[in-house]
Image (cartoon, rainbow, N blue to C red):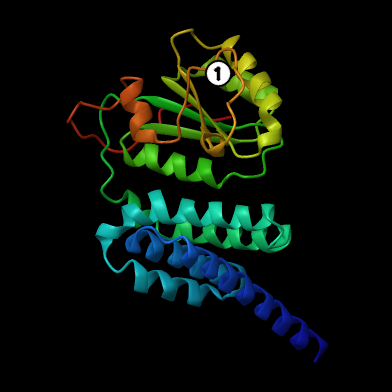
Amino acid sequence: MKSNISNNKQSKYTASIADFALNELTKNVIEFKSYLSQKSVIEFSTKLVDGSHDEQIEFLAKVFNSKKSIKHLYEKFFPDTARFLGNQWAQDLLSFGKVSVGIANLQILLKKYDHLYLENMMTYENVPNILLLTPPKETHTFGSLIAHRIFKNLGCNPLLLVNPSVKEIEKLLEVNSFSLIGISLADFTLIDEVKKLIALIRTITPVNCPIILGGEIENWTGNCPRIPGLDAINSKPEEILEMCELTPKNNLLIPNKNVLEKL
């Protein structure tokens, strides 16, 4: 009985968060489509935190009912949902435990729909090898998971390392040649870790290998501190490839393969 009472209280608490967020949203509606999109994010977030897997699937089936919408699901809706959950924790509206449950459920769904997102992936003969990293102590990894899938969908050959050690990075860079290295940063307090990571990479990689910093850093309100060795700040894979002149252009399709040597 006590457990049921506790669950009921938590459900009401979660629902009240959604109601509060929706009420605040309606006060600042600029565009109806934008409102509907954010409303869906809020409703979906409550199901991730307090709903069942079947309820989450059912919600997505109603909102994204065609294969054409899978691109928006991966590149817009899922990232916006992860960002919303993170903000709920930052504003003390959800506990770290609840947000962790929501993100974990989101990652499960990410894997579930991979076959739809990547089924039309173009694989080329000459593709850029891309290394994606999250800095040590970074706990927010959803952005890097999305970036890995988008780069792959664009025809690249990405490799993702989450919180790698110095030895792991050194060994990987010594046996592989990368066209681009991306670092995902969400935790604002880890900027010094990023500086150390970039300094390490620059001692091993060729000077013409661009290092791009992405993630929530683009949403910082203040000026980003200068980071020696960093080439640019950008979180959009397609723009990054174009900026670095790495967009695959050879139309010759070959079987998908991984040319990187993993640890």
Left or right? Give the position of 173 relative to 137: left
Is residue 172 placed above or below 4 in the rendered structure? above
Q: Residue furthest right?
A: 2
Quadrant holding the C terminus: top right
Of residues 156 and 175, which is closer to you in this image? 156
Percent across and percent down for residue 171 are 61, 20
Percent across and percent down for residue 70 are 32, 57
Of residues 81 and 245, which is closer to you in this image? 81
Quadrant holding the N terminus: bottom right
Percent across and percent down for residue 224 are 58, 26
Left or right? Give the position of 57 relative to 248: right
Amino acid under disc 1: Leu
Label 1 CA crowd tier, 10 Å (few <14, some 14–19, many 20+): some
Question: Measuring 49% from the left and 19% from the top, which residue is drawn there?
Answer: 176
Q: Residue furthest bottom?
A: 1
Q: Quadrant of residue 258?
A: top left
Question: Measuring 40% from the left and 51% from the top, which residue is drawn there?
Answer: 76
Is residue 7 placed above or below 45 in the rendered structure? below
Label 1's element? helix
Percent across and percent down for residue 211 are 49, 20
Q: Residue furthest left?
A: 251
Of residues 38 and 140, which is closer to you in this image? 38
Question: Measuring 54% from the left and 65% from the top, which residue is drawn there?
Answer: 24
Of residues 253 and 85, which is closer to you in this image? 85
Is residue 167 placed above or below 222 in the rendered structure? above
Q: Which residue is mark 1?
A: 173
Total marks drawn? 1
Left or right? Give the position of 227 relative to 6: left
